[in-house]
Image: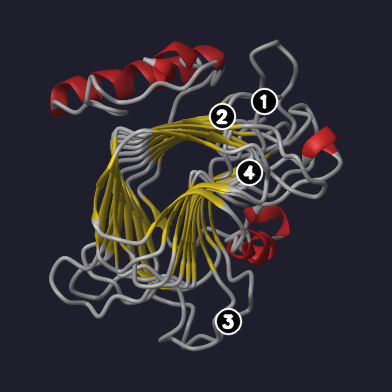
Amino acid sequence: MGPLKRRAAPWLWLALLAGGPGVAACASHHATGDATLVITKGGTYSGAYASTASGTACVRVATTEPVVLDGCALTGPGNLIEAGEGADLTVRNCRGRGLPPTADKQAPGRFLDAYRPRRLVVEHNAFVQTSGIVVNRWSGTGAPGQTLTVRYNLARDVDGRWRNNTGSTHCSFLILNTVQHVPGVDIAYNEVVNAPGQSLVEDNINLYNSSGTAASPLHVHDNFVRGAYPFPAAAGQFTGSGLTTDGDAKTVDGATAFVEADHNQFVATGNAAMNIAAGHDIYFHDNRAITAGYLPDGARFNAGHAGLGVFNFYKQPATVFFGHRVAHNAVGYVKWGGTDPAPDRQDLSPGACAPCTDTEHLPGPIGWITEEGEWRTWQQKLRKAGVAVGPQLARAGSVSK
């Protein structure tokens, strides 16, 4: 996506155990091959499911009857869960672990790859070393309850690297690809931590030609995202972010639209924390964006561009790219050679943040200790809200290390 758009606290492995040019690759990852379990009848399913090949899913949902995956343990190099057209799927209290790809030019599989579902709830799961969640289009009619919620999940090391590091696939913690005009979408209280050298994520959250409604905006709030690094992490070129509104639609009806993103924390994100690269009626407010200029090993983090950016990457007409607001965000973003609001800072993208108002420029120096402070703030926030992330049932299956 252009240089503006495009990519701790402890890494908490023990806790886990107890858009743009990448969209085509992400969307086409949905497989039609084998699966360890193929569900053809509605109901609640639990258990441990494993695959050994990139082309084999652990679980495939092949029914439009309501299905609940509850307390499953999933391991494999391919997609851990796949859901087909018209799926009514709830995934909760599951644990997933991606394994290295068994085929060339393949990334680790998705935790969940859903194609045209009509209802999707993904809550209280934990997954590591997968290429995240993709929801590719939508078949719901807008009837009550036919919506999308992704909440209270714990993700570690979203990874698009091919085997033997011969290339990569753009991937995200969550990408919505052409999920349009859906009311009630709630993406909240997810905790995503990507370690340098162990992950390769593009936009942690990518909204591509996806939209809520004027009365019910697509809501992304109260998430904690730490880490969007190139590979190797000290490299200077990177095109990911914390969150980006994305998409090449040329009509107002098809564009990313009616999005509200607030009270999120984006930490250590190369390139940018939050970008509006496409769409209309998008509102970013009361977020925190903190990126230090160093990696945990003391090396310089060279992949920074700017904390916040608003730019018409796809050159959409004025009838499509309009109505943006970016207000009351707290930013401390280190870019070596930057100038805003001080040397080696770039809180706002140069010449590409006209709608950004009332920005709180955090006092320097912004360093590793500042990023660690954001982790503590997140933990306090969870306690205050009475929220726990990750699986909640003692009977949930475990994933071996």
Task: Give the residue at mark 4.
Answer: 7
Quick one: 388 or 338, which is closer to the camera?
A: 388
Q: Earlier in the sequence, mark 2 or mark 3?
A: 2
User: Looking at the picture, which amino acid does disc 3 mark?
Assistant: Gln
Res. 360 mark = none
Q: Helix, strand or loop at disc 1?
A: loop
Quadrant of the drawing holding the N terminus: bottom right
Q: Which of marks 4 and 2 is nearer the N terminus?
A: 4
Residue in view at x 25 percent, y 80 percent: 141
Q: Do the residues labelled 1 and 2 touch (CB within 8 Å)?
A: yes
Distance from the alpha carbon under mark 1 to that under mark 2: 7 Å
Residue 380 point in image, percent of width and height = 24, 18
- In the picture, measured across the screen, residue 89 lies left or right of residue 201, that is left
Distance from the alpha carbon under mark 1 to that under mark 4: 14 Å
Task: Give the residue at mark 3.
Answer: 316
Res. 290 visible in picture: no
Foreground mark, 1 or 4, reads: 1
Q: In which quarter of the image is residue 284?
A: bottom left
Q: Helix, strand or loop at disc 4?
A: loop
Residue in view at x 40 percent, y 86 percent: 253
Q: Which of marks 3 and 1 is nearer the N terminus?
A: 1
Distance from the alpha carbon under mark 4 to that under mark 2: 11 Å
- In the picture, measured across the screen, residue 65 lies left or right of residue 284, that is left
Foreground mark, 3 or 1, reads: 1
Res. 30 visible in picture: yes
Task: Give the residue at mark 1.
Answer: 198
Foreground mark, 4 or 3, reads: 4
User: Looking at the picture, which amino acid does disc 1 mark?
Assistant: Gln
User: Looking at the picture, which amino acid does disc 2 mark?
Assistant: Asn
Quick one: 61 or 275, which is closer to the camera?
A: 61
